[in-house]
Amino acid sequence: MKLLCNLSIVFCLLVVAKTIQAQNAIPVSGGNASGTGGEASYTIGQVVYITNTGTNDSEVQGVQQPYEISIMTAIERAKGIYLICSAYPNPTINSLTLKVERDNNRELLYWLYDINGTLIRTQKILSNETHISLESNTPGAYLLKITCGNKIIKTFKIIKN
């Protein structure tokens, strides 16, 4: 009788184990986010997702691939120049803000190139915050170079949606 009971338990466990299914993914990154509205866990690395839309908001379930955002610098060519430079939001839709903090009044220029290397626009940086309009540009990747004289200070890869 004990053997029959043990076999029944093993059989039930095998049946239950065969019918239980869970999500299976190999994520690149992830974590937990919490705020006043609740908590959510997320993973990054898969391209499968579903969007559920309600009356007040929408929710994206699944995991997505992130945009590649990289900042390239030319540190060796810019020795002796103190400069903190950032471009945001990236990715952008209509405009980009270039924020520059510098130790002196050197003449800085920005150069905007498309991904093929064609120069689109160049302009002097006159203040700490410069707004660059991208409304007339097509969606894609762009390079934004900051120069001082003939030295490249910083180069940003900008994504326009």
Image (cartoon, rainbow, N blue to C red):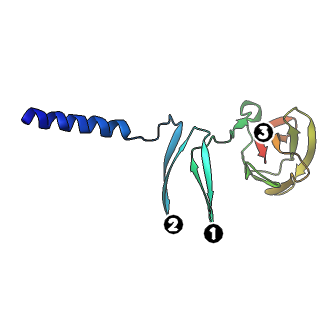
Which part of the image, by quadrant, shows the N terminus?
top left
- Which residue is drawn at the image coordinates 68% and 38% (left, top)? 68
Using the numbered discs, state the Cα–Cα distance from disc 3 to disc 1 in whole angstroms.
Answer: 45 Å
Q: Residue under circle 1?
A: 56
The x and y percentages for residue 108 are: 85, 46
Q: Earlier in the sequence, mark 3 or mark 1?
A: 1
- Under circle 3, the secondary element is strand
Mark 1 crowdedness (10 Å alpha carbons): few <14, some 14-19, many ≥20: few
Mark 3 crowdedness (10 Å alpha carbons): few <14, some 14-19, many ≥20: many
The numbered disc on residue 153 is: 3
Q: Residue under circle 2?
A: 37
Q: Which numbered disc, 3 or 2, marks the residue closer to the eye?
A: 2
Between 116 and 52, the residue placed more toward the observer is 52
- Which residue is drawn at the image coordinates 74% and 33% (left, top)? 74
The x and y percentages for residue 40 are: 49, 55
The numbered disc on residue 83 is: none
Q: Are marks 2 and 1 in contact (CB under 8 Å)?
A: no
Is 12 on the left or on the right of 44, as rendered?
Answer: left
Mark 2: amino acid: Gly
Q: Earlier in the sequence, mark 2 or mark 1?
A: 2
The x and y percentages for residue 120 are: 93, 42
Mark 1: amino acid: Asn
